[in-house]
């Protein structure tokens, strides 16, 4: 058999080399594909804020509008506060916009505030005070002048821990025009006096 020339041998080597490279590449690919793998994923991350909403049933009306008050007069009324929160919160009540009188009527007007359930702005019927004295009686027979000093959320009297969801609480408020221990001349000096205050409830999310 005639031996191929050196030129033919070079052509044959050049033709077979790419095939060898391709074959070797296929072996490497198959070896890589057969390796062990593992994956895990934490999907759907997002952030949204909580919300709080506080309302009452007064329909924009003042709780007390008292004219021609006389010594010894007293009155009790209620207001229901509704908290709607998506996160645990705290509700507190405090005073704003105090009106002081020259005669000092705010010192003779005694205020009692009791927290409980039942009753509405229109009618206190069915109101039941909370059994817990710390949360039930918020203030008892305190002069309006003292109550008016509790004028921020931080200094507010009482506190209502609200869980996530909708909750109600009724506040029974009583005032009394007390002239105990006063002389007739001192009582007469209170004629024509006027005082007042707004009671505001505020809800804040509980610190974690």
Image: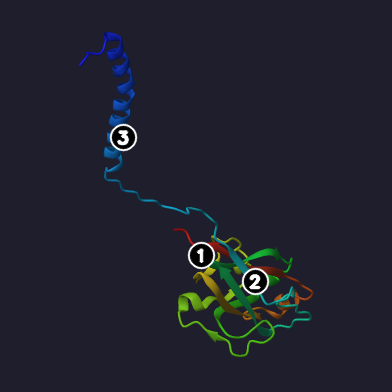
Few, some or many residues within 10 Å of mark 3 (<14, 14–19, 20+): few
Few, some or many residues within 10 Å of mark 1 (<14, 14–19, 20+): some
Few, some or many residues within 10 Å of mark 2 (<14, 14–19, 20+): some
* Residue nearest the viewer, comparing 9 with 41: 9
Dot label at residue 26: 3
* Residue nearest the viewer, comparing 91 with 30: 30
Q: Residue at 67% of width from left, 84% of height from top?
A: 75
Vertically, is 53 above or below 65? above
- In space, the residues marked 3 and 2 are separated at their CA atoms by 73 Å
Q: x, y (%) of residue 151?
A: 61, 62
Q: Secondary structure at mark 2?
A: strand
Where is the N terminus found, in terms of image quarters? top left
Q: Secondary structure at mark 1?
A: loop
Dot label at residue 87: 1
Vertically, is 12 above or below 129? above
- In space, the residues marked 1 and 2 are separated at their CA atoms by 16 Å
The mark closer to the camera, 1 or 2, is: 1
Q: Residue at 59% of width from left, 60% of height from top?
A: 152
- The reply, left or right, for residue 158 in relation to residue 77 is left
- In space, the residues marked 3 and 1 are separated at their CA atoms by 60 Å
Q: Residue at 72% of width from left, 70% of height from top?
A: 195
Q: x, y (%) of residue 174?
A: 63, 81
Report the coloring of the rendering: rainbow
Residue indicated by mark 2: 55
* Residue nearest the viewer, comparing 137 with 185: 137
Q: Secondary structure at mark 3?
A: helix
Vertically, is 91 above or below 32? below
Q: x, y (%) of residue 13?
A: 29, 18
């Amino acid at each position: 058999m005639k031996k191929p020339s050196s030129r033919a041998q070079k052509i044959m080597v050049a033709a077979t080399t790419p095939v060898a490279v391709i074959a070797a590449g296929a072996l490497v690919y198959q070896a890589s594909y057969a390796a062990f793998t593992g994956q895990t994923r934490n999907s759907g991350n997002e952030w949204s804020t909580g919300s709080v909403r506080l309302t009452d049933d007064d329909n924009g009306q003042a709780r007390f509008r008292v004219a021609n008050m006389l010594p010894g007069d007293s009155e009790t009324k209620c207001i229901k506060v509704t908290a709607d929160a998506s996160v645990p919160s705290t509700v507190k009540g405090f005073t704003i916009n105090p009106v002081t009188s020259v005669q000092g009527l705010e010192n003779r007007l005694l205020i009692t505030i009791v927290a409980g359930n039942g009753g509405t702005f229109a009618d206190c019927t069915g109101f039941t005070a909370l059994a817990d004295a710390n949360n039930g009686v918020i203030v008892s027979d305190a002069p309006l002048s003292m109550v008016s000093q509790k004028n921020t959320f931080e200094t507010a009297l009482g506190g209502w821990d609200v869980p996530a969801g909708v909750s109600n609480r009724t506040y029974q408020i009583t005032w009394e025009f007390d002239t105990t221990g006063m002389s007739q001349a001192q009582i007469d000096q209170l004629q024509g006096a006027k005082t007042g205050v707004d009671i505001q409830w505020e809800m804040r999310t509980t610190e974690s």
